[in-house]
Amino acid sequence: MEWRKRLVRLVSEAHAVPGRRIRLFAAPKSGRLYEAALAGGVDLIGTKHLEDTAILLRH
């Protein structure tokens, strides 16, 4: 998918600068989305739903 390629490019560009990170925020609760983000190199996932997000990430 095109968005995965864009994500990988953005992560690569950000990680080329020492100390720079990529954070995902304001995204819907979705295990598939979180898995894709982490696989793409996203460093942080912001959430207001800590328990729900923890459950999604464990599965």
Image (tube, helix red, strand yellow):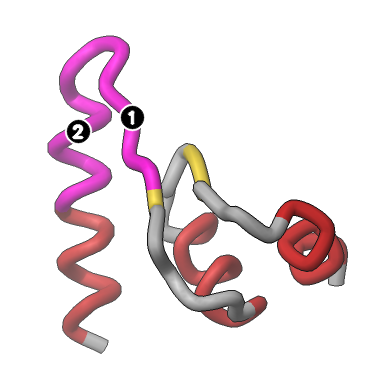
- Residue positioned 83% across, 58% down in the render: 51
Contact flag, marks 2 and 1 (Cβ < 8 Å): yes
Q: Quadrant of residue 54?
A: bottom right
- Residue positioned 16% across, 54% down in the render: 9
- Label 1 neighbourhood size at 10 Å, few (<14), some (14-19), many (20+)? some
Which amino acid type is marked by label 2?
Ala
Q: Quadrant of the C terminus?
A: bottom right
Furthest residue in direction bottom, as rendered: 1
Residue at label 2? 14
- Label 2 neighbourhood size at 10 Å, few (<14), some (14-19), many (20+)? some
6 over 33 or under it: above or below: above
Q: Which secondary structure, mark 1?
A: loop
Q: Quadrant of the N terminus?
A: bottom left
Q: Based on the picture, tell me whether residue 21 belongs to the magenta stretch.
A: yes
15 over 18 or under it: above or below: below
- Residue positioned 25% across, 61% down in the render: 7
18 over 25 or under it: above or below: above
Which amino acid type is marked by label 1?
Arg
Residue 18 x, y percent position in the rendering: 25, 11
| The label number, if any, that marks residue 21 in the structure image | 1
Q: What residue span does the magenta drawing correspond to?
A: 10-23
Q: From the viewer's side, name the closer residue of 45 and 7.
A: 45
Q: From the viewer's side, name the closer residue of 40 and 30.
A: 30
Q: Is residue 4 left or right of residue 36?
A: left
Cα–Cα gap, marks 2 and 1: 6 Å
Sequence order check: which comes first, mark 2 or mark 1? Answer: 2
Q: Is residue 57 left or right of residue 18?
A: right
Residue 15 x, y percent position in the rendering: 26, 29
Residue 31 x, y percent position in the rendering: 66, 77
